[in-house]
Amino acid sequence: MDQNFVQGLHALLVQTTSNDTASLKAATAQLNQDYYKNPSCISALASILASSPEEPVRQLAAVELRKRVNQNSGNMWTLLPQINREEIKAKLPDLILSEPNKLVRHSAARVIAAIASIEIPLGTWDQLLPFLQQTCTSTQAAHREVGSFIMFTVLENIVEGFQQHMQGLFILFSQMLADPESIEVRITTVRALGVIAQYIDSDDKAELKSFQALLPAMIQVIGQTVEAGNETGARQLFDVLETLLILEVSVLGKHIPELAHFLLQCGGNRGFDSELRVLALNALNWTVQYKKSKIQSNNLAPSILEGLMPITTEDEPEDIDDDAPSRSALRIIDGLATNLPPSQVFPALRTLIMQYFNSPDPTHRRGAMLALGVCVEGCSEYMTPLMGQVWPVIEAGLQDGDATVRKATCVAVSCLCEWLEEECISKHTVLVPSIMALINDGATQRTACTALDALLEILHDGIDQYLQLIMERLASLLETAPISVKAVVTGAIGSAAHASKERFLPYFQPTMNHLAVFLNLTGEGEEIELRGITMDAIGTFAEAVGKDVFRPYFPDMMKHAFQGTEMASARLRECSFLFFGVMARVFGEEFAPYLPQVVPPLLNSCKQLEQGEEDLSVSIAEASAAFASGSSPASAITVGEEGANGNISIELEDTDIDKLMEVNSALAVEKEIAADTIGTLFAATQSHFLPFVEPCVLELVALLPHYYEGIRKSATDSLLEIVRTFYDLSDHKEWVPGANAPNSVDHQVKDLINHALVPLLDMYETEDNKSVVSSLCIGLAETINKVGPVALEERHETVCRIAIQILEQKAFCQQDPDQDETEEAPEDQAEYDSVLISSAGDLVASLANALGADFAPAFNGFFPLISKYYKHTRSLSDRSSSIGCLAEIISGMKAAITPSTQPLLELFHRALSDEEPEVLSNAAFAVGLLVEYSEVDLSQQYLPLLAALRNLFVVNDQSSAAKLNAKDNAAGAVGRLIVRNTAVIPLDQVLPIFIGALPLKNDYLENRPVFRALFHLFRTNGPALYQYMDRLLAVFAHVLDPSATDQVGDEIRRELINLIAALNQEDPGKVQAAGLSVFLPGA
């Protein structure tokens, strides 16, 4: 070897370790130019690694040596003469054993791994494995530590070459997991096993069994690491655990109960370091997310909740971004509620909440309230009938003597308002005064304002009695409160405007004057947040007072929004985009002149590269996998040479991708809002948006594979919104249902449909997020209903397959590696799972609507899949959506439903005796449609059907909206029965109830069958209606009221006005008394 070459290289490496930037740059340039392109640099670097007296130089030599070995896919290594390669392979392992510095040892170990990745597949390094086995079983702990680390790094690079030795390795690892002296050996062994796990095939039962036999020891090592307070090791091992949890092969299997118990013990042990406890609890959260079928089948939720509740009583940090065991525990409670059937979660949790809330210790009462708040999202439907037991706890919490309990109760109220709207509205007389009292208390002011904000968002007309009091109090807080409170106060004022609509008008201008100063804030943190919330609130004002009142403020507010897009704040850009969407909705086509200024920032946001996308050698797919799993590659960012493509490469070693993703989270939310706003703008501005359609569609399609599900969902929604709006603007005739019906659309519409649907359907195949798939189903259903059969051309079977997979619970997003493919999914499921099933039902109904009679063959396959969701053991949502879906299918297929009349009728009969009004409502709708469209004579069924429907008419003013809706649907069903066969209906018994249920108050669509029945009776059996004439004329006046919302539609309105004219011929006095003269011809 040329010693001058070695010495020159050594001198330059020394130079690069200096703090002189100019010197470092010069040395780096010379190394790249004169040394690193020559294969001889590999031998020279190996020599320097072996002989340099300076640790930083040896470390740098090791890092650069690994890079050179890997350069150009290993080509530089193979260009080195074989004798030199053999020499390095022979000396390097022993060299590492004698290296005193741990960092240098680790870097040198990675050199061995790099060489192994080239040599092992060629079968040219048979000496490596025996060396590793010998070193890993050495009598010297230091040697075992080196051997285990080399083994780990080699396996990270190349598992395949060792697969024939796997059983021997498992035996070796079982010894290493029990290393008597070195925890480092035990930690590194678990990491090595984490790598091997990723290559185990589900069909290789022997390997799987051997691996699983080591799991108890692996879990024990994680416990030892936490106990020793070894944070670095614990992080590495929890990463391994999270990797095992997300593998498609169920390596953890039967060990889930043991693992959950262990993690709960670690997380609950207050003697351990707080950060290590958070790691354990986060791993438990992943266990709940990814192993929910095992958690469910072993009924682990009650014992997990029992272990979590004491943790919820611990102190929370002031900073909302800081993690703590208490916050992690609440996240797991949320995870249990949203991932498991509520029947497994809420009963056990309710018992614990009551127990903790009755404690004299305020931290226990606070924990109970926070646990109640976080469980609502996943248990809202299940909780609804039990709210009578919950409200006394809430009311007591709002009056609690401890401020932290009162604040926690405000948090719980906010959650209840979001998920149990009707229940909270019914309690406004208790909630509003209690929350207003807490707003007057400095200790609870901020959280009380947040609770008020949530309540006002849903209060609607109920706000009238409180509006003046609320606005006076909030206006004074805008003057006096600290800036963090001003932000929530501004949000609450926005919600007050949302609830009060035009009644907000007296407060509009004074409030605008108050808020104006906030629009000029530029300081980081709280100032930017207040400015953004102010933009949101003013947008809500515009919707409340209307465009004519808001118009004087419109140009100036748009200037502020544009300024927000130009500031270096993702949060302000997000708020500006939301504001653009609101202004477009309020001003419609008047917004069009702003489009050339508005659309480019939206597209720029969609296009902008996120941290690391432009220069990391890790792919975005790899980064997103790490983001999703919580795992991360194992080793230091080294910025160095140009890669093979000439770009600077940044290598991920000893660094955490989670950090990278944290930086990107604000940007991801901004992109989500930008993507969503694009669809809103097109729908609002119509043809003015056409020049922007193509670039917007291209960007939205490009976002479909994004790692963040919120962006995928927004891109999906906007793409389908664009398709529907484009179709509306095109020159098209009303479509005719049928697979081969003569429907045609403009070629540009067809091109757009293809451009959007092809990538969307591709996305479905690998989409793992249920809410994204649910949005896709709902969006596709709306698009198919709008565009008709043209949307299904050449993709009818694909769309059917999507719906079938979801209903069979076998879609990619529903897959569970712990569940056998042949095994039926459990009937009891999480409420979010029911939402997905319901969206698939919407998709099936749209297919029936578009295909009409041609859907009949497919219906035979769909019927059992849909009807299985109507069982008494199923949730309310499942039962309701099953019957509702079948009703919509009948509406689409019409007479083609005839062959299935009998099984459908039997199912609907059962549903008409359900205890839930939502199900009864859909059952009434369904049975009415079946009678209307089936060609089977169902006359003999009329009396039992009328008897079943009779119960739905029993309502009063205090009845729930669901019961009132069921009454309206029952009226519609009776109307359909009357039209189909009046002769078999006992009108003397039916008409008093039928007409007594009018006018309909909730479901105006049912006015169509109701009025068709009335028109039919007037034509065929007029005298039967005479005794009800006064009542009917009052109903007619109600539905024709020009100041009210349209309740009947143009066709019914025309026929009703003709009927009034005819009735006027017979009894003009009654028509005049009813106030209907204004509708007479010539009036």
Image: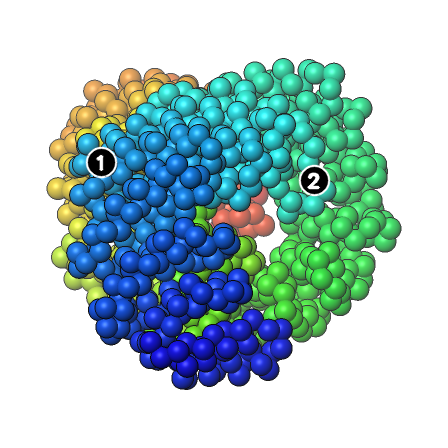
Residue 42 visible within the image: yes
Closer to us: 622 or 775:
622
Q: Is residue 482 above or below residue 568?
A: above
Looking at the picture, which amino acid does disc 1 mark?
A: Gln
Q: Quadrant of residue 844?
A: top left
Closer to us: 111 or 687:
111
Question: Which residue occupies 59% across, 82% down?
Answer: 22
Left or right placement of residue 1046 versus residue 366 in this view: left
Expressed as whole percent of the image width and height from the top left, the position of residue 1026 reads 42, 29
Expressed as whole percent of the image width and height from the top left, the position of residue 1044 reads 56, 47
- Element carrying mark 1: helix
Closer to us: 832 or 208:
208
Question: Which residue occupies 29% across, 42% down?
Answer: 133
Number of numbered discs overlaid on the protein picture: 2
Expressed as whole percent of the image width and height from the top left, the position of residue 778 reads 36, 48
Q: Quadrant of residue 928?
A: top left
Q: Which residue is mark 1?
A: 167
Residue 1065 visible within the image: no
The quarter in which the N terminus is drawn is bottom left
Left or right placement of residue 738 versus residue 510 in this view: left
Q: Residues within 10 Å of mark 1 (few under 14, many from 20)?
A: some
Specify the label residue 182 is tagged with. Answer: none
Q: Quadrant of residue 369?
A: top right
Q: Earlier in the sequence, mark 2 or mark 1?
A: 1
Expressed as whole percent of the image width and height from the top left, the position of residue 238 reads 46, 39
Q: Residues within 10 Å of mark 2 (few under 14, many from 20)?
A: few
Looking at the picture, which amino acid does disc 2 mark?
A: Pro
- Element carrying mark 2: loop
Q: Which residue is mark 2?
A: 317
**Nearest to viewer (mark 2 / mark 1):** 1
Question: Which residue occupies 16% across, 62% down?
Answer: 742
